[in-house]
Image: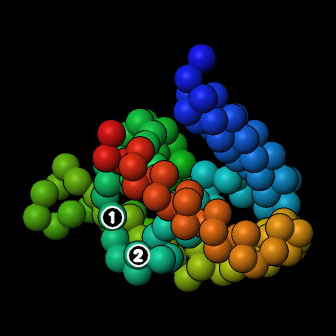
Amino acid sequence: MNNPNESLAAALFSELFMAGQLARSQISKALPKGMELSHFSVLNHLDHLRDERTPAQLAATFHVTRGAMTNTLSKLEWAGHVHIRPDWDDARRKFVSISPAGRAALQAAIQAIAPILSEATADIGDENTRTTLKVLRELRQHLGES
């Protein structure tokens, strides 16, 4: 890495990976008993969409295999947090939506992790948080195009 841009990029991604790992660890510990980070992520996504998605669409969104998504959805369905129904036009497909119990579980999870998120952003300040958010969104969009 003789190129200064390569060193800067390596430092950026090193910090991103470490921050991501630390955030996942802290948030996972704070989630309500029985809820995994993958469960929270799917419930949060479905809640924001306010619409149904197929397991394949969810797998693509989260960049996981269909098998991994099926496993997550099975656990969420068992807990009563999602409804999974057949596609009336194509019996091979299913649709997933968040249930009222899933919304309640999501709200409990958000309340549990809110202090961690608030403390972290308070420590770096509003302006730095806004700037970082802008940069991370641009980076995510760039990587999504690749």
Q: Is residue 58 left or right of residue 37?
A: left
Q: Where 2 sits versus 125, above or below?
A: above
Q: Amino acid at mark 1?
A: Arg
Residue at 83% x, 67% y is 124
Residue 72 horizontal/vertical position (percent):
54, 48
User: Which one is in front, 134 or 112?
Assistant: 134
Q: Is residue 68 left or right of residue 108?
A: left
Q: Are marks 2 and 1 in contact (CB under 8 Å)?
A: yes
Secondary structure beneath dot 1 equals loop
Image quarter in which the N terminus is found:
top right
User: Which one is in front, 144 or 142?
Assistant: 142
Secondary structure beneath dot 2 equals helix
Q: Is residue 59 visible?
A: no
Q: Which residue is mark 1?
A: 53
Q: Where 37 sits versus 108, above or below?
A: above
Q: Which residue is mark 2?
A: 49
Labels 2, 1: front one = 2
Q: CA distance from mark 2 to mark 1?
A: 9 Å
Local crowd size for mark 2, using a 10 Å CA cut-off: few (<14), some (14–19), many (≥20): few
Residue 69 horizontal/vertical position (percent):
46, 45
Residue 29 horizontal/vertical position (percent):
85, 53
Question: How does the figure colour the protein chain or chains?
Answer: rainbow
Q: Is residue 136 left or right of residue 18?
A: left
Q: Is residue 68 left or right of residue 58?
A: right
